[in-house]
Image (tube, helix red, strand yellow):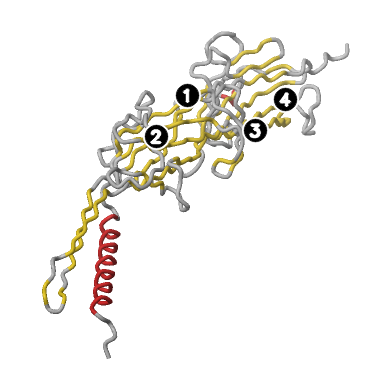
């Protein structure tokens, strides 16, 4: 039995048409460029007692609004290593425009004063920090951002990305293990405004483009914040000094008068950071005498070995350019006149070996 009359059928057909239009609008709006005009017209054709009636029509028009959606992500896998006084160290962020419109972006940078960066507490401050944007998007070739590059993102196309590079100079007084974090804030702006006109959330303007923030799961505010930073690394040196009695001990192995004692100084760099301009001062006891022209050292006074490479070292003529001197009772290795200066590199070992004699007292008359 059919219970739907003509009027009910009309309502049903109108409802179905509206639902179809709404579904069609939803499918069209996903990925559709902001500002695209949408026009829909409904037509109702009906009869009364078999007589065709004039069609009923109505139209609705609007433009697709802007879904403001973007992502800011650090590109590195870990904190960037930096050494004291190092300049021009950098790391990158990737900004991706997930909106249905090109966008400009404002950028603000600040050094952290507290909090975590990559799970590590911020403890230090770089001497200077600045940033630059790549001169082109990733899709356009994305050249290396240079330090004096653009300070805002200009008309980044939908579904495109661009790099933002943060540069930093470390201070000379920064300590090994210090972490210096940076906060980068990126704010969506009106495309073509040079980043000057920040977008605001607007609604219900059928004839214009409204902005709907969607960069976070719960909506958003048109701002994305990301963090990255540096960690100070320094050469990790350890020094040991040992001695052994090698001659003149009457077979006792003891440091008796007349015995020759050999000192061995070992300096190990267990880090990946080179130790530069290494200078060793070793103070001799006044009761021993430095042996010169040691045959075991190839005629040198001191044997200096850097990871298997022997460096010349004679002390009898100060200022001879080999970097070894004897000033009073102080043996110096790596003096300023040594060319090149001693560098203990990644996981390298420097060994300094020399001999002294314990003077034998004059025979009793």
Mark 4–mark 1 distance (CA, rounded to whole Å)? 49 Å
Give the mark nearer the N terminus: 4 vs 2. 2
Q: Nearer the viewer, mark 4 or mark 1?
A: 1
Location of mark 1 (residue): 87
Give the mark nearer the N terminus: 3 vs 4. 3
- Residue 213: % across, % down: 41, 46
Location of mark 3 (residue): 238
From this view, report whether residue 340 is shown above or below residue 176: above
Question: Which is nearer the eye, 251 or 215?
Answer: 215
Give the mark nearer the N terminus: 1 vs 3. 1
Give the mark nearer the N terminus: 4 vs 1. 1
From this view, report whether residue 193 is shown above or below residue 78: above
Picture disc at residue 185 = none
Picture disc at residue 260 = 4
Q: Relative to 202, is 10 on the left or the right?
A: left
Q: Residue at x 25, y 69 (%)?
A: 14
Tell me if label 3 and label 4 are in contact, CB under 8 Å: no
């Amino acid at each position: 039995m059919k219970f739907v009359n003509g009027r009910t059928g009309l309502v049903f057909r109108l409802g179905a048409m509206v639902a179809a239009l709404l579904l069609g609008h939803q499918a069209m709006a996903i990925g559709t460029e902001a500002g695209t005009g949408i026009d829909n017209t409904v037509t109702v054709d009906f009869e009364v007692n078999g007589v065709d009636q004039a069609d009923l029509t109505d139209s609705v028009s609007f433009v697709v609004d802007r879904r403001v959606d973007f992502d800011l992500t650090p590109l590195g896998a870990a904190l960037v290593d930096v050494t004291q006084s190092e300049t021009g160290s950098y790391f990158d962020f990737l900004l991706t425009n997930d909106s249905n419109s090109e966008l400009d972006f404002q950028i603000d940078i600040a050094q952290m004063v507290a909090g975590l960066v990559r799970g590590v507490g911020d403890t230090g401050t770089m001497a200077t920090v600045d940033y630059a944007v790549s001169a082109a998007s990733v899709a356009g070739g994305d050249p290396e951002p240079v330090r004096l590059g653009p300070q805002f993102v200009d008309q980044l196309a939908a579904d495109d990305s661009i790099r933002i590079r943060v540069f930093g100079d470390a201070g000379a007084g920064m300590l090994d293990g210090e972490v210096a974090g940076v906060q980068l804030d990126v704010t969506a702006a009106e495309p073509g405004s040079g980043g000057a006109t920040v977008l605001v959330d607007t609604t219900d303007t059928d004839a214009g483009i409204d902005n709907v923030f969607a960069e976070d799961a719960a909506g958003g505010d048109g701002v994305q914040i990301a963090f990255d930073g540096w960690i100070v690394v320094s050469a990790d040196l350890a020094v040991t000094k040992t001695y052994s009695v090698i001659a003149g001990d009457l077979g006792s192995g003891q440091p008796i008068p007349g015995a020759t004692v050999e000192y061995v100084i070992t300096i190990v760099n267990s880090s990946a950071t080179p130790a530069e301009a290494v200078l060793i001062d070793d103070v001799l006891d006044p009761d021993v005498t430095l042996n010169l022209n040691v045959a075991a050292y190839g005629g040198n006074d001191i044997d200096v070995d850097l990871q298997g490479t022997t460096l010349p070292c004679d002390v009898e003529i100060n200022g001879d350019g080999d970097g070894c001197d004897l000033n009073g009772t102080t043996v110096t290795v790596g003096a300023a006149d040594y060319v090149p200066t001693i560098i203990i590199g990644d996981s390298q070992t420097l060994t300094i070996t020399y001999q002294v004699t314990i003077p034998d007292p004059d025979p009793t008359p």
